[in-house]
Image (cartoon, rainbow, N blue to C red):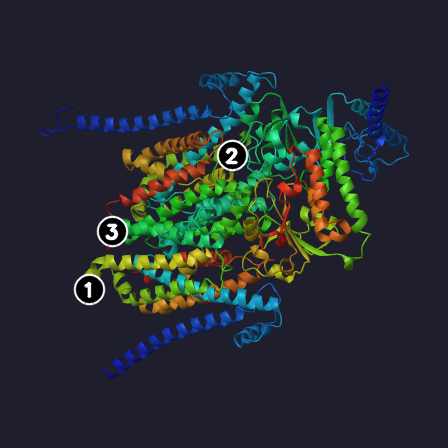
Amino acid sequence: MEVGLSSLKEDYRIYILRKTVFMIACISVALLALGLSVSFGKYEIGFFESYGIIIDHLRGIEPADEMKHYIVWELRLPRAIMAIAVGAGLGIGGAAMQSMLRNPLADPYTTGVASGASLGAAVAIILGICLIPSLTGQYAIVVNAFFFSLIPATIIVLISKYKKTTPTMIILAGIGVMYIFSATTSLLMLIAEPDSLAEVYIWTVGSLGRASWENIPLVITFVIIGIIIIQTNSRNLNILAMGDKNAISLGVNALRTRLTLLVTIAFLTAGIVSFTGTIGFVGLIAPHIVRIFLGSDNRYLVPASAALGAALLIVADCIAKEAGATGLPVGVITAIIGGPIFLMILLKMRSKAWN
Amino acid sequence: MSGDAGSSEFSSEDMKEQYHSYILRKILFIILCFILVIILGGYALTIGGREIAHLDVYRILWEHLNGAEYPRGTSEWWDDYIVWEIRLPRVLMAIIAGISLSVCGVAMQSMLKNPLADPYTTGMASGAVFGAVVAIVLGMSFTTAMGMYGIVGNAFIGGLIPALVIITISKFVRTTPATLILAGIALSYMFNALKTLLLITTNEENIQEAYIWQIGSVQDAVWADIPLMFAMTVIGSIFLLSTSRQLNLLTLGDDSARSLGLDASQFRTVCLILLSLMIASIVSFTGIIGFVGLVAPHMVRMILGADNRFITPASMALGATLILAADVVGRTIVAPGELPVGIIMSFIGAPIFLYLIIRQKKGYGEVY
Amino acid sequence: MATIAIASILVVSGLGLVLLSQESDGYRSTDFPERLMIFGNANNDDYLDEDDITTLEKIIAGELDAEDHPLADANQDGVIDQKDIDMVRKMIDREPMEIYYLNAHGDVKSVQYPVGDVAVVGTGIMGAVMSIGADEKVAARSFGATYDRTLIGDLYDVPIISDSLFRADVELVSNIDGITAILTQESTRYVQNADVFENAGIDVIRIAATDGLDTIGGILTLGYLLGFEEQANEYVRFCDEIISYINDRVGPDMMADDERVTSLSVVMINSVSGKDSAYFSATQIAGSINLADWDDTTQRFQEGDEWLLSYDPDFIIHARGIGYGDVDIQATWDQYGQYFTEMRAYKEGNYHILNGNPPVIVRIAYIASIFYPDIIGEDFGDIKHQEFLDKFSNADNLNVKEDVVSTINVHMLAA
């Protein structure tokens, strides 16, 4: 008896330990990459110099080199912070989507948010129309992208309310709406001037370059609220995974929980996509990798996905900043790296982690 | 012999008769579909920037086939040139693409036991286009025969990647239709991003040109494009038509199929290679035309049931009709300009896709 | 009586002097070889005349090397012989016949001379046709919002034969009688379905109309093909004068490198021109040192990018097709300047938005006057632009200084 109990305790401790170690590892990598990324970039700034600039700024000292100060403080630092926030948001959104819809291939964009945002951006760029008429330029694009990205989610929520929907139907409805929005965006792009077309294309690919001290507070707000809501629902997510009928018998209203999460993830993703465009694969892959180490308990899966997502994205952005002659948008890097990883996941998929 | 079954309402004669009329109705429907293709194709031939009377178009075709020649530059010469060199290839390309993509859709839906599978939703079309782009970037071009085969060959390889992935995951994991489509979407996204990357870095300013190239369109079709598409479509269609029974068996599950004499894996592999060839040969010339392989079989199934022996030919005809209709609509809405077929098809296909999902009463293999 | 007599004599002599001065002006462009790309132009100058026969005779006699005269083989049969001389003689008489020329891609093409009515595809080539006054030859044009009505006048109203700037639709072209050729620009983007036209007996003529100094040769060739040589030569003279003016002051031998300004040029929204681009050479011709060191035609400088910040040009020239209509100067400035606010050139007020609608030569004049206002003259661009508008365009009484926005820079904005 004694032996059984203590080995059980032992196993449990190792279990908790693994989770903690993993979380710490992810967060450390993220922080490390955050620190390193400040020194990455096409403009030559020495490694220690970049930290010197940050420290000087914080101490209120006048910058020695205006240009370097601008680059480190106005370009790289906001971008790195944005990468952490966005990566965390996408990671946690992906984890929640996959658990809630019981599908390993769901990601934050499954509700069609990305296609809505692209359409919004296209309308702003190509037609020059903004939902708030007085806005122009980047502001118009962000506002449009945000509101348009919520339309697909709204449609799906409405469908869910009026018709009994299974998770699969939610996914497929999301896909259907995505196709419709894509078609509209394609039409717009067809009639666009070459300049506007290029702008829309590049916006859609997903980039962290638009990060600035102005928009970071907004993004961080969205992400933090999203994380809080999702984390408090993580037990419910576990219960949902057992099936809707079982969930009800345990006192969890499956439909309500799902709707809450849908809306939360929609806002979270909308808040991200409006500023970055579609950065793919992070929300898809981060939960999978976490699952390999931590299993499917959402109470740990969810925050760990956030941490890993953040780490993944900032590393990807470091690569993106140095790639090619001029740097590449991070969306391209996540597609290049994430794509094959995704394929590997698909090919190795075993039912274990899911049933 | 009547009266054999004794007191039963239905003698075997009656049953045979009923069965025959059942089959007859289906065959009639299929024939109707083909007639529809011819009518619509004939109508599509009459649409264009040059004013040619409807009946004249057919007369010109007839006389051209009889070897008529006109002095160059005259009005009749132009009528003949336009109808024969410009419009006819375009209509043929639309028909061939419609046939090919629908037949691929039918086959995929049986192979993967997934009502939502088609060349587009599974990501095969995107993969094929990516392959084509790689070939073009490497310097191959349609102007030489070798270049054309090179591009289509690359498209074939490109289309195989998603195909292999899809097949593998559907074998090893009990996937819901949703999973498959999600995989297809992720694959499409990946290929699109890679393709964009290629196009942006090699041809900085020509994003618009690249974008227009890959939108599904039958504009600028020329006779030189037709033979390869036609050959692949004919081969593929004949194969799939003659193996309709085997396709039916696949939907029963691999083990049941084996007990009935079919090696499901091998058959799937052969089908897959063929499908990839077909898709590559279409997509390299037309760009991405989505939803045909989804919508046509579904509409046909609503009327004819699920037997592939009937669905396959009917879908071929209906698919051709769909693309022809899209072409006609695209040319009429913004005459004398053109809205590409791909865009029209997505506006038709996406709502139908959504509708199909919403109206589904039972779930798609959901486990509660 | 006497006053009438004297008055009439004065008038007549005045007229006579005017006429005489035109004729005895006798201007011939001599310093610029290899521009008239017609086979038969054996001596490589701007004219097809007796001098070419002389050159051919010398080549046949062995005094001159055929390799130095790539345009000598008039009938493209591979040999230089009497047949070429006969052909050139007929060409000198401007007889209708089939002739050969080099198009913008350097391909040898044949065409029926003189070229009849054409369908124009491309705003640059439309401008070229307008500059040589060949309006009557334009029977149709492609669709496009970028054709500027103010500039091309009635040419804007010709029938439209496509739904895109870059295309010509065969069916629509066939609707118009008398079109013998499609006239278009060097980029392969234009008229991609050229084969369809060629097979139908309609030539597709590609002339350099957008790329720096190549446009001068393009216009000469175009003028010959359409039968508007005199006007073409006049326009070419206008171009040559601008180039000479600039060269004499800031040309390759006129300044030391460290006296020159440095520059970068931008096109579209944020595509910075590389060594392969027309704007790169434009800024070089205007006497600056362009700091671009990449081979691609352009490289994008997106929001958040750093790479351009490593370059420190004195001037940034951003070419945009602003057009000849009303322009919201502040909005244009905000929209296109936003990417370059951290560059020293911008901060010092040396970021200029340049109207891309005038022809390349005029833009070069503007660029030179921006770089070296003291040496070239602040107004040089405006003067030449006005000359262009008055003599070579269909614009109606347009005053460059009052009616047109040719450049935008920070000093023009409301304080």
| Residue matched to label 2 | B228
Determine if marks 2 and 3 fall on one subunit: no
Q: Chain of mark 1?
A: A
Which residue type carries mark 2? Answer: Leu
Give the side of residue A4 with respect to residue C397, left or right.
left
Q: Which of the pair C161/B171 is nearer the observer?
A: C161
- Separation of residues labelled 1 and 3 (CA atoms): 22 Å
Q: Residue furthest left?
A: B7
Q: Quadrant of the N terminus of chain A?
A: bottom left
**In what element is the residue under mark 1?**
loop
**In what element is the residue under mark 2?**
helix
Mark 2 vs mark 1: give the one in front.
1
**In what element is the residue under mark 3?**
helix
| Residue matched to label 1 | A250
Q: Which of the pair A2/C132 is nearer the observer?
A: C132
| Residue matched to label 3 | A161
- Separation of residues labelled 2 and 3 (CA atoms): 50 Å
